[in-house]
Image (tube, helix red, strand yellow):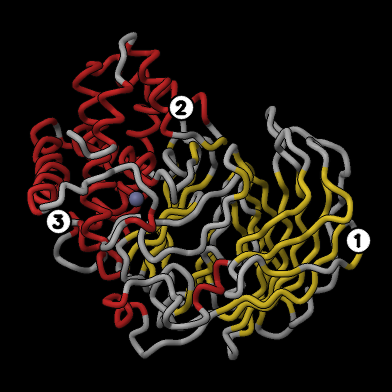
């Protein structure tokens, strides 16, 4: 994500249980076990309600026996004004016409074809809990069927609708991650990108009024007409850690092929739309060269009713439409380059974005600087490094009397976007810059490529990152990196 404020330069049907075939036995794809999501949904434009049927083939990917399975119900954060994932001073921008609730209501949960009793982990219904009758053994799978109703709020955040776009982000029940620390059941915090997920495969069918154009994770195509005035869109996303989509009745689309990937720009403003396409294409070329190939066949940049600058999802990023037609196309370029870098750091190599936000944001922010170095030369790269990274970081540090400048910290510890972005983005990027200077370009880029290659389609930790960089450097760097992450230097 990149918040605007830090860019200085600046037919009720379908819900029938038509199912995909289920394989009860362990399957491995490219050496990994992945969950499979099949979603079939129908959007009622009048009510702004989506009726969804979802079947998940869920694998126990851990070495422990699982007694419960949990799903995040992120839309329920939007139920009330005081739980909506925005800071108080953002509410007017998020809800330009006043607060409007959004939510998801799950109607039933069947496990392996049997009706199940299920419940919520919390009073606010942010997490759905399924207690299994029979624990799930490592490597074994079960199928979970759900039907739900999703209400979109009139909201200019990640999830909601506005004058121009319908944004389905963090919208369906998504399995929580079970890792070394157990289940990760964090709610939707207002600061940062409070998400953490495993790589999965998705097959999604979306029916909505015929006038809409849909951009999504994976490969999306306009399929047949359904009923009067409705059309189905089908999307296939393989090896992705989330599935998002956005739709508009007035999108114009431009495409360009780069290294086997189709880059698409969905926009309203012609000049900005072209600039977004061209920036995304150059960024994909540059990052593929620096870190390793982009492993997907599509990447889409979509203009959005969106007050928060830009937001990354697998194969798809949302960009504030206001950035497209403002004089400063420079800002549009910065945001598109930043969100494109997230395709490597977050998309392919994932991490816990709640506990270790610096890991993807620091790498992404520094990658954005590298984009400028590669595209415009060292002088521009240095200028960006200075104005976007160094200055904000040091001026924030100087303003802190109590020396609380911790970079590696849980999202809920940050009190403002300024604190979060100065420390996590700028401070995180400065640690990466420090590493580059310590290792020299050859070892630094070798390290980043090794990190990308080793943790591709997995979740990595700060420790994993340090270990790889230290191996490549052949000298101890851990203490210094940890001190910097604690804000001690
Ligand atoms: Zn970001």
Residue 471 appears in view = yes
Give the residue drawn at x 51%, y 47%.
Answer: 298
Q: Secondary structure at mark 2?
A: helix
Q: Which mark is residue 464?
A: 2
**Label 2 CA crowd tier, 10 Å (few <14, some 14–19, many 20+):** some
Closer to us: 207 or 239? 239
Residue nearest the viewer, comparing 201 with 423: 423
Gap between marks 1 and 3 measured at Cα: 54 Å
**Which quadrant of the structure image shows residue 250?**
bottom left
Residue placed under numbered mark 1 in the picture: 113
Label annotation for residue 8 = 3
Dot placed on the residue nearer the N-terminal end, 1 or 2: 1
Task: Kindly tell me whether residue 375 is visible in this rendering.
Answer: no
- Check the image and report above or below for 303 versus 399: below
Q: Which residue is depicted at the point 53% across and 31% down?
A: 456
Q: Is 83 positioned to the left or the right of 442 in the image?
A: right
Going from the N terminus, do you reach mark 3 or mark 2 first?
3
Q: Residue 277, position in %: x, y?
A: 35, 52
Q: Secondary structure at mark 1?
A: loop
Q: Position of residue 57 (x, y in %)?
A: 78, 50
Marked residue nearer the N-terminal end (1 or 3): 3
* Left or right relative to 326: residue 102: right
The residue lying furthest to the top in this view is 474
Percent coordinates x, y for residue 215 in the rendering: 51, 62
């Amino acid at each position: 994500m990149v918040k605007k404020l830090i860019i200085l330069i600046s037919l009720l049907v379908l819900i029938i249980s038509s199912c995909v075939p289920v394989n009860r036995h362990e399957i491995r794809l490219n050496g990994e076990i992945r969950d499979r999501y099949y979603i079939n949904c129908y959007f009622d434009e009048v009510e702004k309600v989506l009726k969804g049927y979802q079947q998940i083939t869920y694998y126990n990917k851990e070495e422990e026996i699982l007694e419960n399975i949990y799903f995040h119900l992120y839309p329920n954060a939007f139920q009330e004004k005081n739980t909506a994932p925005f800071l108080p001073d953002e509410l007017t921008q998020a809800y330009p016409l006043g607060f409007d609730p959004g939510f998801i209501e799950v109607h039933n949960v069947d496990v392996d074809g049997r009706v199940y009793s299920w419940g919520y982990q919390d009073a606010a219904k942010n997490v759905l809990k399924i207690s299994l009758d029979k624990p799930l053994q490592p490597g074994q799978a079960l199928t979970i069927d759900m039907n739900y109703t999703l209400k979109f709020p009139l909201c200019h955040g990640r999830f909601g609708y506005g004058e121009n776009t319908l944004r389905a982000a963090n919208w369906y029940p998504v399995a929580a991650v079970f890792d070394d620390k157990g289940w990760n059941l964090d709610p939707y915090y207002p600061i940062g990108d409070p998400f953490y997920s495993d790589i999965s495969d998705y097959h999604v069918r979306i029916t909505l009024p015929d006038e809409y154009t849909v951009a999504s994770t994976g490969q999306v195509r306009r399929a047949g007409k359904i009923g009067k005035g409705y059309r189905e869109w089908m999307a296939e996303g393989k090896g992705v850690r989330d599935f998002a989509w956005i739709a508009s009745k007035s999108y114009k689309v431009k495409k360009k092929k780069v290294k086997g990937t189709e880059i698409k720009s969905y926009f309203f403003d012609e000049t900005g739309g072209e600039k977004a396409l061209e920036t995304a294409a150059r960024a994909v070329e540059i990052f593929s060269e620096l870190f390793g190939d982009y492993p997907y066949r599509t990447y889409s940049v979509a203009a959005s009713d969106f007050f928060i600058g830009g937001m990354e999802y697998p194969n798809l990023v949302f960009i504030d439409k206001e950035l497209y037609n403002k004089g400063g196309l420079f800002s549009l370029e910065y945001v598109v380059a930043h969100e494109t870098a997230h395709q490597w750091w977050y998309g392919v190599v994932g991490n816990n974005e709640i506990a270790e936000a610096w890991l993807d944001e620091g790498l992404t922010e520094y990658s954005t600087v590298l984009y400028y170095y590669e595209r415009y030369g060292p002088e521009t790269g240095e200028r960006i490094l200075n104005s976007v990274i160094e200055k904000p970081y040091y001026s924030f540090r100087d303003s802190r009397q109590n020396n609380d400048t911790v970079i590696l910290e849980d999202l809920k510890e940050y009190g403002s976007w300024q604190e979060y972005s100065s420390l996590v983005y700028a401070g995180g990027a400065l640690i990466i810059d420090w590493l580059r200077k310590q290792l020299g370009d050859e070892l630094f880029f070798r390290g980043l490529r090794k990190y990308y290659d080793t943790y591709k389609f997995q979740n990595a930790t700060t420790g994993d990152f340090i270990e790889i960089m230290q191996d490549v450097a052949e000298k101890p760097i851990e203490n210094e990196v940890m001190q910097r992450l604690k804000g001690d230097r």
